[in-house]
Image (spheres, rainbow, N blue to C red):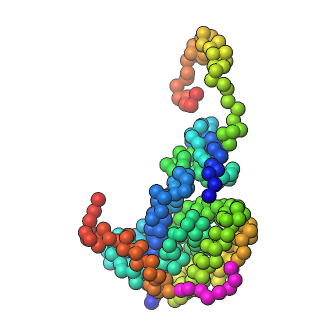
Amino acid sequence: MNNEQALFKYVVRLGDNALVLAQRLIEIVADGPELEEELANANFSLDYLGQARMFYSYAGEIEGEGRKEDDFAFRRPDREFENVLLVEQPNGHFGDVIVRSVLFDVFYLLQLEALSACSDDRLAEISLKTAKEIRYHLRYGSQWLIRLGDGTEESHGRVQDSLDQLWRFTGELFDGDETDELVLAGFVGPDLDKLQAAWTGAVAAIVEEATLALPEDQWMAGGGRDGLHSEDFGYLIADMQHLQRAYPGLNW
Amino acid sequence: MTDKNWPLYEVFIRAKSGLSHRHAGSVHAADDEMALNHARDVYTRRNEGVSIWVVRSSEIVASDPAESAALFEPAKDKIYRHPTFYEIPEGVENL
């Protein structure tokens, strides 16, 4: 793999994370517990979708084989999606959605902030723009997590459970491979060790303020970034792609 | 599950610097900070604002509609209090 191929793979992965999380949040549109939460969720979902479009479009340009954003989103089999397992986890209840978002957004924001200073101008530009959206997502998500954790006995118990259940998907965020190394070396990309230290500190601070307990060190799931997904992912992608699969090339 | 509703907040948005905040509507929220988030998500999605105020609806002191005759009708025939007789120079906006 050369530097350009690594950059391509890296940008597709960014798109995959954003698209899969967008799709998960789209699943709960019209199901919000309050009108205000409903709009917030739909906004967030569209933010991630817009980010995925930017990443995929750019990936298509790097690759130079004429692939467009829709080719990446709708015409790849599940094994070619290299999102982290965390973002594909099923929605569960409101607390699960919030915990999943916070765990991912803390990582994503750190990643984007590092990428804003990378030596690839386009990626730096997209990351800078995207970071602004994620900063708000994180503000919203962490404020909710603090209120749920420090709320009633029931809400506390439920989000503690969400945190315990989702924790095993956080190790993969920092499980770097050749792609990460090449982007770090070739384009001054994010240093995953530094990201992990910053993530651990930031998450611990939110968890503490939420009066929750950090889960203990444990076995961590992995494989998403190699295209090995959970069973749930098959349903997600079938739902997302079925129109293009049934009517290839269909347009509005 | 309780049936307790979140308190209501009134939302005021400043459309751009130099203008005053205007009442945009209301949101329900668990507390003050969340009310700001909700106001942002509900009322500034189409780039409507640069600043938001939220205030609990219960904190607003409002005039009583039953007293409107006493409060407002006396002003109706005081036409000399209007600046109608001044000419507005061209190019003045937002007066």
Residue A248 appears at what percent x and percent y? 26, 71
> Compared with residue A107, is residue A42 higher up or lower down, i.e. above or below?
above
Picture quadrant where residue A53 is located: bottom left
> In the rendered image, is residue A158 in sight?
yes
Check the picture and name the quadrant holding the C terminus of chain A: bottom left
In the image, taking residue A186 as reference, residue A248 lies left or right, namely left
Work out which quarter of the rendered image holds the N terminus of chain A and state it: bottom left
Membership of A220 in magenta stretch: yes
Q: Is residue B43 above or below residue A67?
A: above
Magenta portion: prevailing SS class: loop
Q: Nearer the viewer, residue A155 or A65?
A: A155
Q: Residue at x 47, y 68 (%)?
A: A24
Residue A124, percent across and down? Answer: 53, 70
Q: Which residues are magenta?
A: A215-222
- Give the image location of residue A19, x and y in percent: 45, 70
Number of marks present in the image shown:
0
Instruction: Please tell me which residue is depicted at 26% across the width and 65% down the height of the picture.
Output: A250
For residue A79, side relative to residue A17 (left or right): left
> Is residue A206 at all visible to an observer of this figure?
no
- Image quadrant where residue A215 sits: bottom right
Q: Residue at x 70, y 62 (%)?
A: A152
Q: Is residue A109 above or below residue A230?
A: above
Asked if residue A123 lies in the magenta stretch, the reply is no
Q: Name the residue at 55% across, 28% down.
A: B92
Name the image quarter holding residue A245. Answer: bottom left
